[in-house]
Amino acid sequence: MYSLAFSILFVSVLVLTLTVRFWLASRQIRHVLAHRALVPHEFAEKIPLAAHQKAADYTVAKTKFGLLTLLVNYAVLIGFTLLGGLQWLALHMHELTGPGMAYQIGLIVAFAAISGLIDLPFEYYQQFVLEQRFGFNMMSKSLFFTDLLKNIGITAVLGLPLLWVILVLMAKSGDLWWFYAWLVWSAFSLLMMIIIPNFVHPLFNKFTPLADEALKSRIEGLMRRVGFASKGLFVMDGSKRSAHGNAYFSGFGANKRIVFFDTLLSRLAPQEIEAVLAHELGHFKLRHIVKRIAMMFVISLGFLALLGYLKTQPWFYAGLGVDPVALALTGQPTDALTLLLFLLVLPVFTFLLGPLASLSSRKHEFEADAFAATHTQADDLVSALVKMYEDNASTLTPDPLHSAFYDSHPPASVRIRHLKGATA
């Protein structure tokens, strides 16, 4: 009875989210195309019509491709759940390995391998067709597959030990396993903030100290003004993969590093680079990073507590296409199967909460912009943003509802209007 009700609920929410996603995508396409012929007046003197139309075409192409990807992902989701794909995979994996930890880890690895093979053609198309068409792809095919192999290896080295610990906790630490798992996951996440920038990123990109002494002096002056200590200023060779540009800082404590994409440095003037960095430093000084990490920990604790409850509910498995009787050979649904089911269906039930996350992120972006306008010239940040919007082919005319659901940053016109208000 409960399993049927949960199946109906799952299908209903699935259809609802799919409908909303298609509705938002259609709004985005219509809105962008309706404004394609004319550059918004506030950008008319700074962005050529050709660049505006390229951004519109790029946005529409990405949105249409996203719809195709979405349909495939939902079909795969239904195949793994309601059509019994995950149960089939569990039974066959058990035949290969027998019971035990090898079976559980093997099930998750097999699922990840199948999912990765399904995603691979779409990732390839996006890089070598979509990005190539609009002049953003700088990656060779050999680098694409080298990156893929590196990602698989790093995921195995870092992820499999964590997975083993979580599965052991689920099996042997009692009803509060989810709390102990949360402690382990939180510690792992903090550790990754040190490991990834110092040991993982250098496997993919070359980081060289910033050589421009004048720019370095300007940035160091900014850091002194705002009270920010960094381990160093580095330039990343992002141009070997993409023409998109950005700047960021990584790590925490004594390991904070400021990184500029080489594509960004080649396009912006020194005062504009300083303004962009001031925005990023604003996130740090206003404790946005700490707040986001804390919120991530709180949310993950809630989800793990929910998983702890669902783990003991037969209707959760039966409602998602897993028959406990059929899996009696494996000793009832396994913890690995529980994790997979939960991770598969969680995005379906949380999608409609997306605007809340976007709202919080946008608030932080406005605050970081205001911080930058206080410590540098707001006009420099405006001119930098205009160049970055143009260079990245970011549409200046997104649909407001689509943007509210998906965009972590405010629309260009709104953001620049706020900055010009700060200047005034």
Image: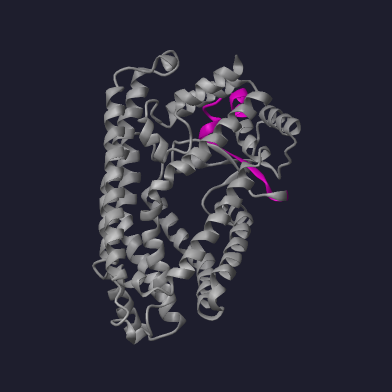
| Image coords of residue 338 (percent x, y) | 41, 71
* Rendered residue at 36%/75% (across/down): 314
* Rendered residue at 41%/62% (across/down): 343
In the image, residue 379 lies in the stretch drawn in magenta: no
| Image coords of residue 418 (percent x, y) | 54, 22
Vertical placement of residue 278 versus 85, above or below: above
Q: How many marks overall?
A: 0
| Image coords of residue 73 (percent x, y) | 30, 55
In the image, residue 266 lies in the stretch drawn in magenta: yes
Q: Is residue 250 visible?
A: no
* Rendered residue at 31%/64% (across/down): 6
Work out whether residue 97 or residue 29 is closer to the camera in this orientation and state it.
29
Work out whether residue 234 or residue 229 is closer to the camera in this orientation and state it.
229
In-image side of 229 versus 51 (left or right): right
Identify the image quadrant of residue 323: bottom left
Vertical placement of residue 215 versus 23, above or below: above
Vertical placement of residue 187 versus 34, above or below: below
Q: Is residue 252 visible?
A: yes
| Image coords of residue 31 (percent x, y) | 30, 28
In-image side of 273 versus 375 (left or right): left
Magenta span:
254-276
In-image side of 160 versus 333 (left or right): right
Quarter of the picture containing the N terminus is bottom left
